Image (cartoon, rainbow, N blue to C red):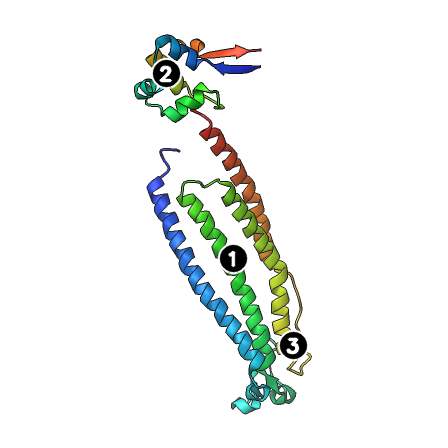
């Protein structure tokens, strides 16, 4: 390796990143269980326990920042039930957490490989492929869950001003494609590493 | 067309063991063995230099081109 490359500092950095990824995985696992609990609570809670109107909540008038107007009487008196929101919210949260969990898991695999001085191994490249496809898949799938959650909220408010729409998460899809391009660089690195190893 | 490494022949001529050459050159026996059996893609000039120094030979004695 190049003498200007600070190997010691790099190793420390990777070790710290590996520990952070591990802590992240533990926290995300707890969050995943939490979101499943929210989902189960939504499934089994009696509907009348979580049904209310905005006027019941001592809200005399709610000002909608986006529309720049006070909400109508219909909206204020509409019965809102949290049951469907808890179910769809729990599932949406679980899907989002699962996405980040998988990301952290794959990153941890990459960090472990780098720590073991195999930064361009086939496992690293495979993990990066999985990360790229997770991002692209999440760009398509997660907005579906978000759409279901928003729909469950909007459907309870009798106002033409609120609407739920499905849209792809172009940011995530773009990141996925960016990682696919970066994999090409890693594959070149793997080729150089093989050449290096086969030279005496 | 290939380049054949004649390290084994030169070592036999000098009656030198792999371990002795390894100690003399500072190259591991694993790498010398790979070189001897032709399981390498490339050889560094620095490697050739130390081997030639220890075996008192020329690079041409170690490498042979076969058509």
Total numbered circles: 3
What chain does mark 3 sit on?
A: A
Vertical arrangement, residue A186 with respect to residue B8, above or below: below
Whether residue A191 sits left or right of residue A24 in the image: it is right
Q: Is residue B11 visible?
A: yes
Whole-number angstrom distance, CA of label 1 to CA of label 3? 34 Å
Query: Which quadrant of the figure contains the C terminus of chain A?
Result: top left
Of residue B37 and residue A170, the one placed in the foreground of this image is B37
Secondary structure under tag 2 reads helix
Q: Residues within 10 Å of mark 3 (few under 14, many from 20)?
A: few
Q: Is residue A65 visible?
A: no
- The answer to whether the residues at label 1 and label 3 have Cβ atoms under 8 Å apart is no
- The answer to whether the residues at label 1 and label 2 have Cβ atoms under 8 Å apart is no
**Residue ID for mark 3:** A162
Q: Give the percent coordinates (x, y) of residue A122.
A: 52, 41
**Residue ID for mark 2:** B51
**Residue ID for mark 1:** A102
Q: Give the percent coordinates (x, y) of residue A143.
A: 62, 64
Q: Give the percent coordinates (x, y) of residue A165.
A: 67, 69
Nearer to us of marks 1 and 3 is: 1
Q: Which residue is drawn at 49% across and 29% down?
A: A195
| Discs 1, 2: same chain | no
Secondary structure under tag 1 reads helix
First in sequence: mark 1 vs mark 3: 1
Q: Residue at x 35, y 40 (%)?
A: A7
Nearer to us of marks 3 and 2 is: 2
């Amino acid at each position: 390796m190049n003498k200007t490359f600070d190997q010691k500092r790099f190793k420390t950095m990777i070790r710290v990143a590996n520990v952070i990824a591990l802590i992240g995985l533990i926290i995300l696992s707890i969050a995943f269980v939490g979101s499943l609990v929210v989902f189960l609570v939504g499934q089994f809670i009696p509907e009348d326990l979580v049904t209310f109107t905005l006027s019941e909540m001592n809200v005399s008038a709610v000002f909608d920042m986006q529309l720049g107007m006070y909400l109508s009487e219909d909206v204020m008196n509409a019965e809102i039930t949290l049951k469907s929101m808890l179910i769809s919210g729990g599932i949406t949260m679980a899907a989002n957490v699962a996405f980040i969990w998988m990301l952290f898991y794959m990153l941890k695999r990459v960090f472990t490989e780098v720590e073991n001085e195999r930064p361009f191994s086939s496992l690293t490249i495979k993990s990066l492929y999985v990360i790229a496809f997770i991002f692209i898949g999440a760009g398509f799938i997660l907005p579906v869950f978000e759409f279901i959650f928003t729909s469950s909220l909007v459907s309870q408010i009798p106002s033409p001003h609120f609407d739920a729409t499905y849209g792809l998460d172009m940011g995530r899809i773009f990141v996925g494609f960016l990682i696919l391009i970066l994999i090409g660089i890693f594959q070149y690195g793997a080729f150089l590493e093989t050449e290096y190893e086969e030279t005496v | 067309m290939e380049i054949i490494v004649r390290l084994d022949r030169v070592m036999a001529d000098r009656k030198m063991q792999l371990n002795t050459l390894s100690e003399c050159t500072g190259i591991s026996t694993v790498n010398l063995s790979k070189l001897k059996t032709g399981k390498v893609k490339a050889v560094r000039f620095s490697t050739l230099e130390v081997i030639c120094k220890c075996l008192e030979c020329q690079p041409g004695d170690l490498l042979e081109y076969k058509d």
